[in-house]
Each structure stands twice: as C-alpha cells, then as structure tokens.
Image: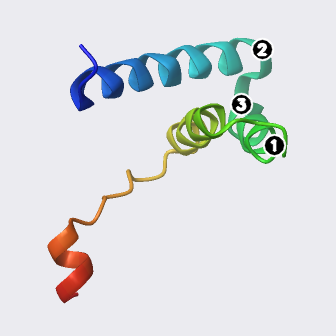
Amino acid sequence: MFGRKSRRNVFERDVRIEIELLTKLHGENAAQIAAEKAARPTNRTRRRLVLEEAQRRLSGQAPQLRKGILTMIFG
C-alpha cells in the first residue's frame, strides 16, 4: 500500500495529469511553462518534482538514470 511501487504509480499519474493540463492550456509552449512553474520558490518538493518530470517529458529529453549505491561508491 505504501511501498515504492505504489508511490511511483501515484507520481506517474500526477505527471500524466500535469502533462494533459499543460498541453490543453498552453499547447506547444507547455514545456516552457512547466519549467517556469517548477522554478517558483513557493513550490513544495513533490510539486516541483512533478513539474520537472512533466517538463522533461514534454521537451522530449531522455529519462535520467538513477545511479545505484555501488556505482556511486566505486564510480
């Protein structure tokens, strides 16, 4: 219920909803608007992460691969 998989599913849903709203309201400028909204200092961490991910997907950038602990330690 509260595991990593569940949180990831909620995060993915929030990103999809944000992408839909931004594209519906702003069309081709959606990626730029998402970046501007993510840069606002009043955003909470979760909101900022959702907006950053939406901006990354809207601009067509490749997904960021997260490094594992062993890769961080041993390079």
Q: Which of marks 2 and 3 is nearer the N terminus?
A: 2
- The residue under label 3 is which amino acid type? Ala
Residue sitting nearer the eye, 1 or 9: 1
Q: Name the residue under label 3.
A: 30
SS for tag 1? helix
Left/right placement of residue 62 relative to residue 66 reads right
Left/right placement of residue 34 relative to residue 52 reads right
- The residue under label 1 is which amino acid type? Glu
Q: Quadrant of residue 22?
A: top right
Q: Earlier in the sequence, mark 2 or mark 1?
A: 2
Work out which residue is located at the far bottom of the displayed protein and give it. 74
- Residue plotted at (27% across, 66% down): 67
Label 1: few (<14), some (14–19) or many (≥20) C-alpha neighbours in 10 Å: few
Mark 2 and 3 residues: CB-CB less than 8 Å, in contact? yes
Give the percent coordinates (x, y) of residue 58: 57, 36
Considering the image in quadrants, where does the N terminus appear? top left
Left/right placement of residue 51 relative to residue 28 reads left
SS for tag 2? helix
SS for tag 3? helix
Considering the image in quadrants, where does the C terminus appear? bottom left
- Residue plotted at (48% across, 52% down): 61
User: Residue 25 — which label?
Assistant: 2
Give the percent coordinates (x, y) of residue 26: 78, 22
Q: Name the residue under label 1.
A: 36
Q: Which of marks 1 and 3 is nearer the N terminus?
A: 3
